[in-house]
Image (cartoon, rainbow, N blue to C red):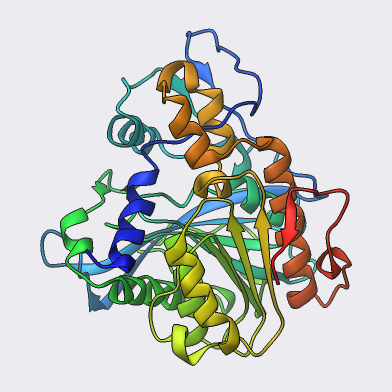
Amino acid sequence: MTPRRAFSALLAVGLLAAAAPGAGAVTAPPDGRVRLTLPAPSGPYRIGTTTLHLVDAARPDPWAPTPRARELKVQLWYPATRTAGHLAAPWLSPAEEAHLESDYFGIPNGRLAWPVTDGHEGAPADHGVRHPVVLYSHGSRADRSFDTALVEELAAHGYVVATIDHTFDAGEVEFPDGRLEVRNTTAVHAMSDADVVGVRAADTRLVLDRLAGLATGTDPDAEHRPVPCGLAAALDLSAVGMFGHSMGGATTLQAMHDDPRIRAGATLDGPVFGTVATDGLTRPVLLMSSAWASPARDAMWNTLWPELTGWRRQLNLENSGHLSYSDLELLIPQGQSVIHWPADQLDHFLGTGNGPHAIAAQRAYLLAYFDLHLRNQPTTLFNGPSPAYPEITFTR
């Protein structure tokens, strides 16, 4: 196994062993399940959310078990004018959550009550001004929901965020007809890492193309389900950013390389695969690493660094693990009475730091980064270490 393939494989299986101490109190709903929660976002906007089913008839799906066109599930999170009368969205659909429990964590269904988000389904969008758009790409075997704490923070501060499920590399994706498509590990592993990232980057281009259509009045949904009122007029596609965790970070870098519409990108503890590794980028790039020891990641970043000729920073989240850059930093410790991972695995994958404060720091730096490069709002956070976030250290 090559170092690159070993790195990718570890990222995928890492989701099976995660947690960290001290991430918050556990409460039990009346039905006896352990309730998991995420912190409320700090921004002034209410949040709306909706899902889109996108089909690319021109592109065969390279990972589908039977021949078909490539199809994706995308969830949009956006500033809303009001949320009364609109249900709060679940973290994942019930079918997706059930598969996550059995396939990822090997626990009986129904023992955990997964978070109810701050996004309200179909709420009317704020379109008094157009809002910058940020794309999100998940890690291998993860889902569009895995960084909801970060996504909601951006939406509450006036961003439209499109979270992408990369079908058959995502752990589970439920489509409107009730189909649950799960990760096709054999097909994904048959490809090189660069080719995997290439498929994901093509997914990103499809999402941007369909959002451009939406902004001009075209309903991109395959079933033509109506989009929330005002959403088309809320998109500012002249100000597009992207971020991703793990292989989603690799996807972010390659998607930036391939598509000049993406003005700024951030990778959260991700590798570097594809032509971006040698071609580099002229647009802003934020690299955020965990304290997880990864010589492969470090070597890739060292190779990429001289090829980044625009604004660039590399930060490190102290006392963290690879999965600290996900909602699992908070959710697994809350559900540890059900999940029962050994202490050494908890420390390895989520570190020994303060989970809620780690998420707060990620929220602050990611928001400041996109505010700086998509809204031209100055910030001092990238001038050097901040006493407000001592767990963030500057690597270069």
| Residue 196 x, y percent position in the rendering | 30, 70
Instruction: Work out whether residue 39 can be spotted.
Output: no
Q: Quadrant of the C terminus?
A: bottom right
Relative depth, front residue between 334 and 159: 334
Q: Quadrant of the N terminus?
A: bottom left
| Residue 55 x, y percent position in the rendering | 32, 68
Compared to residue 89, the image places residue 70 above or below, namely below
Image-quadrant location for residue 199 = bottom left
| Residue 37 x, y percent position in the rendering | 61, 29
Compared to residue 319, the image places residue 352 above or below, namely above
Image-quadrant location for residue 330 = top right
- Which residue is painted at 49% across and 85% down in the image? 257
- Which residue is painted at 39% across and 45% down in the image? 14
Compared to residue 39, the image places residue 142 above or below, namely below
Instruction: Work out whether residue 233 can be spotted.
Output: yes
In the drawing, does residue 85 fall left or right of residue 75? right
- Which residue is painted at 53% across and 52% down in the image? 50
In the drawing, does residue 351 fall left or right of residue 167? right
Compared to residue 37, the image places residue 156 above or below, namely below
| Residue extending farthest left | 66
